[in-house]
Image: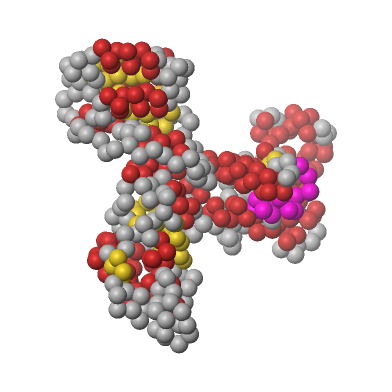
């Protein structure tokens, strides 16, 4: 919208500072802003307004005293389906995001937000055409997708937008990022939620059996086919079929799958009766299908059929702020299974864990929690409880992953010692003691501005001792050159 002048925007939030910031920012780009502290006040004003006085868009907080943002959204949509409402909240999870979209929100804005992002949303809301699809009330099923990061909030947003759709979805992401979990969430929040969710890993089934698994077979179709067998397409019915690792599907089956998607019907192996299907297809892969197409390993026409909506899941290293939440969730779930109190993670160890690469992503993190739950003897998990593969090298990398911010120095020293012992090294004190003294000396000299007598006092040594130590360390350094 190039000229927002005279365009009326309402901002509803019980936080005066949020109202002030939004009113100032939107006014600066030409909008006419009316702030409200409560949703009830806005509703009263809306009922009194005629078409000329109504806003072109509304920004509304989710949690407020009195009428909540959701209740406000419902009441407005009962009167005017076309009025775009943007829900704002600091409490962002998958269910809340999906509910916002399913109740008819134009968009969902997680706090804290970028003010330019909010302005852009308002401009798009004002361009929106009148009319909204019918409201689909959400499922109460809670999905185990955990996170507050910007990256995972974008995943929530896409799932929410898909909640009224039957469109094919292609989920990409590294192994262990939760592709099937997201596929199940899409199904649970879709119009097909009452139908079955059928999942099959196309890479885990031999090629000669995969066709029968997908499409079924008739009795006597091949040696060993003693009875008729329904394939996954039939089992999925009016629900969702999730094809994991689609990039590994043999070329011949890609052709059959394309035909099913194009014609909406298939034949069992050995059958001559066409079977109609209305299943929704969600696919997933850790491979780059575009590159496979270029290498003639994946059909381009099938790729375009599947790639209607593409959802890329972030690796764990790109959402490190979610690691403490995920660790707490997995440890609590494991404790609940055993009827025990959940173990807590030492702050230094938590800092250390948040800095790991996690090449195995969420799956590796969950397995690490299982290790902790069994191997850690105390109520608080310490650095000494780490499995060996996480002690100092991340998946064969040569570079140690201990940093100066890892945590308490005793924990760092413990990790260093375990690294050396695991590598078969002996005489650890002969290496550690000089490094320990050298570090303390350098810090003391830096703190004293190079004054040796002051540095000696800081260390609790006499000046002669400090001078001797400096000579020893200098000689040790030259011997190593």
Residue 268 occupies which quadrant of the picture?
bottom left
Quadrant (top left/top right/bottom left/bottom right) for the N terminus: top left
Q: Residue at x 38, y 47 (%)?
A: 190
384 displayed left or right of 255? right
Q: Residue at x 45, y 52 (%)?
A: 184
Judging depth in this view, the residue of 455 and 276 nearest the camera is 276
Look at the picture and state if 22 lies above or below 189.
Answer: above
Residue at the extreme bottom of the image, as rendered: 223
Look at the picture and state if 412 lies above or below 450.
Answer: below
Q: How far across and down, in percent of the image, does residue 74 sit? A: 35, 27
Q: Which residues are magenta?
A: 368-381
Judging depth in this view, the residue of 386 and 263 nearest the camera is 263
232 displayed left or right of 145? left
Question: Residue 435: in sight, yes or no?
Answer: no
Q: How far across and down, in percent of the image, does residue 314 sit? A: 44, 50
Judging depth in this view, the residue of 376 and 339 nearest the camera is 339
Asked whether residue 393 is drawn in magenta, I would say no
The image shows a total of numbered marks equal to 0
Q: How far across and down, in percent of the image, does residue 389 sit? A: 65, 59
Question: Residue 363: in sight, yes or no?
Answer: yes
Q: Residue at x 26, y 30 (%)?
A: 81
Q: Residue at x 42, y 71 (%)?
A: 230
Look at the picture and state if 49 lies above or below 175.
Answer: above
Look at the picture and state if 126 lies above or below 381.
Answer: above
464 displayed left or right of 154? right
Asked whether residue 376 is drawn in magenta, I would say yes
């Amino acid at each position: 919208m190039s000229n927002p002048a005279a365009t009326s925007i309402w901002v509803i939030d019980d936080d005066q500072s949020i109202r002030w910031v939004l009113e100032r920012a939107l006014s600066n780009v030409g909008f006419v802003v009316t702030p409200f502290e409560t949703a009830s006040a806005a509703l009263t004003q809306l009922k009194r307004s005629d078409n000329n006085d109504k806003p072109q868009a509304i920004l509304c907080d989710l949690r407020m005293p009195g009428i909540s943002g959701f209740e406000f959204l419902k009441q407005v949509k009962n009167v005017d389906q076309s009025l775009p409402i943007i829900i704002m909240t600091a409490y962002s999870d998958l269910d809340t995001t999906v509910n916002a979209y399913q109740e008819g929100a134009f968009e969902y804005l997680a706090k804290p937000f970028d003010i330019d992002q909010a302005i852009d949303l308002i401009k798009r809301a004002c361009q929106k055409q009148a009319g909204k699809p019918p409201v689909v009330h959400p499922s109460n099923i809670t999905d185990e997708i955990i996170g507050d990061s910007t990256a995972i909030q974008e995943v929530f947003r896409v799932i929410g937008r898909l909640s009224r759709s039957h469109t094919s979805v292609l989920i990409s992401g590294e192994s262990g990022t939760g592709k099937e979990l997201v596929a199940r969430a899409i199904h649970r929040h879709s119009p097909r939620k009452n139908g079955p969710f059928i999942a099959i890993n196309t890479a885990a089934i031999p090629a000669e059996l995969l066709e029968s698994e997908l499409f079924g077979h008739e009795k006597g179709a091949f040696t060993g086919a003693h009875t008729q067998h329904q394939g996954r397409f039939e089992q999925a019915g009016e629900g969702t079929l999730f094809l994991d690792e689609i990039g590994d599907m043999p070329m011949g089956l890609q052709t059959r799958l394309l035909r099913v998607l194009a014609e909406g019907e298939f034949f069992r192996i050995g059958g001559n009766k066409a079977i109609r299907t209305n299943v929704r297809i969600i696919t997933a892969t850790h491979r780059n299908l575009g590159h496979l197409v270029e290498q003639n390993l994946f059909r381009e026409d099938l790729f375009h059929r599947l790639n209607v909506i593409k959802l890329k899941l972030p690796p764990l290293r790109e959402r490190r702020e979610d690691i403490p939440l995920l660790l707490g969730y997995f440890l609590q779930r494991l404790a609940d299974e055993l009827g025990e109190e959940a173990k807590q993670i030492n702050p230094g160890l938590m800092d250390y864990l948040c800095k790991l690469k996690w090449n195995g992503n969420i799956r590796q993190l969950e397995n690490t929690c299982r290790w902790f739950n069994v191997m850690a003897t105390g109520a608080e998990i310490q650095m000494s409880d780490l499995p060996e593969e996480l002690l100092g090298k991340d998946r064969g990398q040569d570079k140690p992953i201990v940093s100066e911010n890892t945590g308490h120095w005793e924990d760092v020293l413990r990790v260093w010692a375990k690294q050396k012992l695991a590598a078969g090294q002996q005489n650890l004190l002969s290496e550690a003691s000089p490094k320990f003294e050298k570090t303390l000396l350098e810090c003391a000299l830096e703190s004293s501005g190079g004054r040796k007598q002051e540095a000696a006092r800081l260390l609790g040594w006499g000046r002669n001792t400090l001078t001797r130590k400096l000579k020893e360390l200098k000689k040790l350094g030259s011997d190593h050159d």
